[in-house]
Image (cartoon, helix red, strand yellow):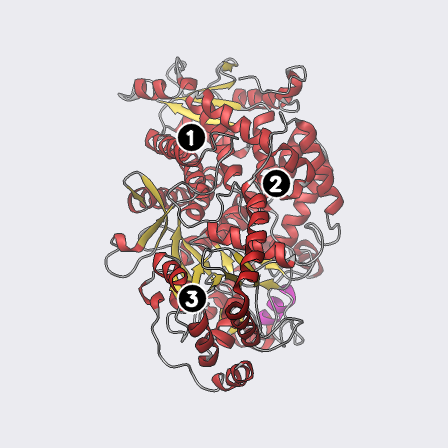
């Protein structure tokens, strides 16, 4: 049986698989729909598949991936389209396909199981389960036949099917033992370790210094992932300590990423990660969350340095999302694939002859030299656009200014981008994920503040309105939405949201409030956080579970603190609680945030690089927060000038609120936001109050005085609240 499966796999490559619709045909996930015509009798995760496995006492083959995953596509072509492999799966297993972006809870549990079994993980994630959902064998990509030191998939299926039929009790015992370990690992969360202090941040900074790649930027060796959380920690600690080395590390990393092949030099936006140390050869998929987090990192770096490069990269990244990743109803799509026409990166790479044919010999030569396009190339004679030489040096060598160089390059990029649009684009996963939309709404809101561009704010508001109207049902936030082409009815939205969905959307709504001063955004954030506390908070040990009680058929209820490609739900939730505590005067929110940080203290000390976003929340908790109250007309020119002064400065540990004293709703606003009480305009002009723990400096109503009072606020930002409290170990609110 195994030999025939291997032989037929080769034959299947020579002809397209027959049209076959399995149970995935009714799903909305683009990833699941990609598998709807496989001869494998796939089920989505749900009661139909799980009850059949129990009823027939068959093992479950669980395969988890996502639409932009290159090796997921490879395994589909090699194995899941093979009729002989499908025969084995259909006869001996209940096969379930899961989109990890829809079900991150399942992905976390079974990825942990595979890591316990093999020491590694990745996607596609392929796990074999008993009918009661306990894992007993698993791995990532399996080739069709033995290679790369991995067993061939057909042979593996035959072996597991035979073992299950002859000795299922032995496999069940192994599964029980692994499940006990798994539940201990994913279910225990963190253990309370007492109050955190500034030493924990100093330790993290020292680890980043040790791991820094001084030649190419970033941390460690290849592959290199964009370290947006680490950039945040470095910029904050540089602001507190004045250590220029921290800014140098952050700047070198941001520069190398911006000039490397991981950044799309024509279309803007970042690819997923670099396969090499130099940030040159990327894995070409583009994820919404990477671009949201990196846009925010470049915005903060521009506030610190004033570098035109950082402002341009932030703007281009946001523009990429608005142009290529926006749903017609206002939300943002999840990802773009690495592949087009069956080849990874084909959409993005160039040969010199193509460029010169489009631009002419002289301008084409200039473009190729600047962007490192050569005959040898990087991928089979095709080049990845990057900037191998410092732009100032490149301009100087040609006897022109940097501005003149940029003026020459800009129309050339426009021409090539237009030509590139005629190519076959990579596939897109056009589902809308609540958490990732929260990240992008936040990035756009902050972009509107820092860059002063109203269009970013309008896009953020439109997306937030979409989430709150289309992705909330009976007060419950939903995880995903996809426009199914039938007018956008409720059939395209589904799955109860997870912790990170609530936290990221609430964080975005706070950013929207601080961009518009429309109280409805703050009220909506407070409602979401109230629901988050009710449904996810661990009353016994503190911290938030990842799933609510409404999520069924799970081996464990996990409590995430680790910051991976995206901030953990507890990281973002901590920041949200701290900001709302300041804005709404809610001491209960502050206490919950303190509980989370105390629980995760030992984790952050032991492995700082795994908790960079949680360390940013720790920074907000430990160091003084500027509470800035404005009294004035939201659209008044004097108010806008003050906001420009505020937003130009790097002040991550701040909250910002506004009251228009004579407006009809001012009493409601002041009642809701204690910071705004008794804040009036002086001589009819917009007035700013800079406060700490509701104790305010003298109000100011001219720009020079505001700059002075903000600079004076810098003087006490170098000392943590814990230290200023005489080492008490708690924050004084």
Q: Residue at x 33, y 67 (%)?
A: 25
Q: Position of residue 675 (x, y in %)?
A: 43, 18
Q: Residue at x 60, y 30 (%)?
A: 192
- One can see residue 578 in this view: yes
The magenta segment is: 363-371
Closest to the observer, 122 or 696: 122
Give the Cα distance between marks 3 and 2. Answer: 40 Å
| Residue 58, quarter of picture | bottom left
Question: Which badge, 3 or 2, comes first in the chain's sequence?
Answer: 3
Closest to the observer, 10 or 466: 10
Element type at mark 1: helix
Q: Position of residue 251 (x, y in %)?
A: 66, 45
Q: Does 723 sit left or right of 627 as displayed?
A: right
Foreground disc of the pair 3, 2: 3
The answer to whether residue 337 is above or below residue 549 is: below
Foreground disc of the pair 3, 1: 3
Q: Does 219 sit left or right of 534 as displayed?
A: right
Q: In the rendered structure, does residue 365 fall within the stretch colored magenta?
A: yes
Number of other residues with Cα within 10 Å of mark 1, as a class: few under 14, some 14 to 19, many 20 or more: some
Q: In the rendered structure, does residue 727 fall within the stretch colored magenta?
A: no
- The mark found on residue 94 in the picture is 3
Question: Label 1: which residue?
Answer: 640
- The mark found on residue 612 in the picture is 2
Question: Which badge, 3 or 1, comes first in the chain's sequence?
Answer: 3
Q: Position of residue 659 (x, y in %)?
A: 37, 22
- Give the overall secondary structure of the magenta segment: helix
């Amino acid at each position: 049986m195994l030999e025939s499966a291997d032989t037929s796999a080769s034959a299947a490559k020579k002809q397209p698989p027959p049209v076959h619709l399995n149970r995935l045909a009714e799903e909305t996930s683009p990833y699941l729909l990609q598998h709807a015509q496989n001869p494998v009798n796939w089920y989505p995760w749900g009661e139909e598949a799980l009850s059949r496995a129990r009823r027939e006492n068959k093992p479950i083959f669980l395969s988890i991936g996502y639409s932009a995953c290159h090796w997921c596509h490879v395994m589909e072509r090699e194995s899941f389209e093979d009729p002989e492999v499908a025969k084995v799966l259909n006869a001996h297993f209940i096969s379930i396909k899961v989109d990890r972006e829809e079900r991150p809870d399942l992905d976390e549990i079974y990825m942990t199981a595979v890591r316990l079994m093999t020491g590694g993980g990745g996607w596609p994630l392929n796990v074999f389960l008993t009918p009661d959902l306990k894992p007993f064998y698993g791995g990532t990509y399996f080739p069709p036949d033995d290679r790369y030191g991995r067993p061939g998939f057909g042979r593996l299926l035959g072996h597991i099917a035979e073992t299950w039929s002859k000795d299922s009790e032995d496999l069940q015992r192994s599964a029980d033992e692994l499940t006990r370990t798994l539940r201990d690992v994913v279910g225990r969360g963190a253990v309370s370790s007492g109050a955190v202090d500034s030493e924990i941040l100093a330790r993290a900074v020292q680890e980043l210094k040790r791991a820094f790649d001084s030649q190419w930027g970033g941390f460690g060796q290849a592959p290199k992932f964009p370290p947006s959380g680490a950039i945040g920690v470095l910029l904050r600690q540089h602001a507190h300590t004045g250590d220029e080395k921290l800014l140098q590390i952050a700047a070198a990393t941001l520069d190398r990423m911006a000039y490397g092949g991981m950044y799309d030099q024509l279309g803007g936006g970042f690819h997923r990660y670099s396969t090499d140390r130099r940030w040159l050869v990327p894995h070409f998929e583009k994820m919404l969350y990477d671009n949201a987090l990196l846009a925010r990192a470049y915005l903060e770096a521009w506030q610190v340095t004033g570098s035109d490069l950082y402002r341009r990269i932030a703007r281009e990244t946001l523009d990429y999302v608005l142009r290529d990743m926006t749903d017609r109803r206002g939300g943002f799509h999840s990802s773009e694939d690495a592949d087009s026409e069956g080849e990874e990166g084909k959409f993005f790479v160039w040969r010199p002859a193509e460029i010169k044919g489009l631009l002419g010999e002289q301008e084409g030569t200039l473009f190729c030299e600047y962007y490192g396009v050569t005959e040898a190339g990087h991928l089979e004679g095709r080049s990845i656009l990057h900037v191998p030489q410092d732009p100032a040096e490149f301009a100087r060598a040609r006897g022109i200014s940097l501005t003149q160089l940029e003026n020459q390059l800009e129309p050339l990029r426009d021409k090539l981008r237009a030509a590139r649009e005629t190519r076959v684009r990579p596939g897109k996963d056009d589902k809308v994920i609540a958490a990732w939309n929260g990240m992008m709404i936040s990035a756009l809101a902050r972009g509107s503040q820092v860059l002063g561009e109203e269009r970013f704010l309008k896009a953020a508001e439109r997306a937030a309105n979409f989430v709150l109207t289309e992705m909330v049902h009976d007060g419950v936030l939903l995880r995903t939405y996809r426009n199914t082409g039938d007018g956008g009815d409720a059939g395209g939205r589904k799955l109860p949201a997870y912790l990170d969905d609530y936290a990221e959307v609430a964080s975005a709504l706070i950013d929207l409030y601080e961009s518009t001063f429309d109280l409805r955004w703050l009220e909506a954030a407070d409602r979401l956080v109230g629901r988050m506390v009710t449904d996810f908070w661990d009353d016994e040990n503190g911290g938030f579970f990842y799933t609510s009680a409404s999520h069924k058929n799970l081996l464990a209820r996990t409590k995430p603190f680790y910051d991976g490609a995206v901030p953990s739900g507890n990281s973002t939730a901590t920041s949200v609680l701290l900001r709302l505590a300041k804005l709404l005067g809610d001491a209960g929110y502050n206490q919950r945030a303190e509980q989370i940080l105390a629980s995760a203290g030992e984790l952050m000390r032991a492995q700082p690089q795994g908790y960079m976003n949680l360390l940013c929340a720790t920074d907000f908790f430990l160091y003084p927060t500027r509470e800035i109250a404005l009294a004035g007309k939201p659209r008044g020119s004097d108010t806008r000038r003050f906001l420009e002064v505020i937003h130009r400065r790097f002040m991550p540990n701040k909250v910002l609120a506004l009251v228009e004293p004579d407006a009809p709703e001012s009493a409601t606003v002041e009642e809701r936001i204690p910071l705004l009480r008794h804040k009036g305009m002086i001589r009819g002009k917009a007035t700013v109050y800079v406060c700490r723990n509701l104790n305010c400096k003298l109000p100011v109503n001219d720009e020079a005085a505001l700059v002075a009072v903000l600079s004076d606020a810098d003087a006490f930002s170098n000392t943590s609240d814990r230290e200023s409290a005489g080492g008490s170990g708690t924050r004084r609110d």
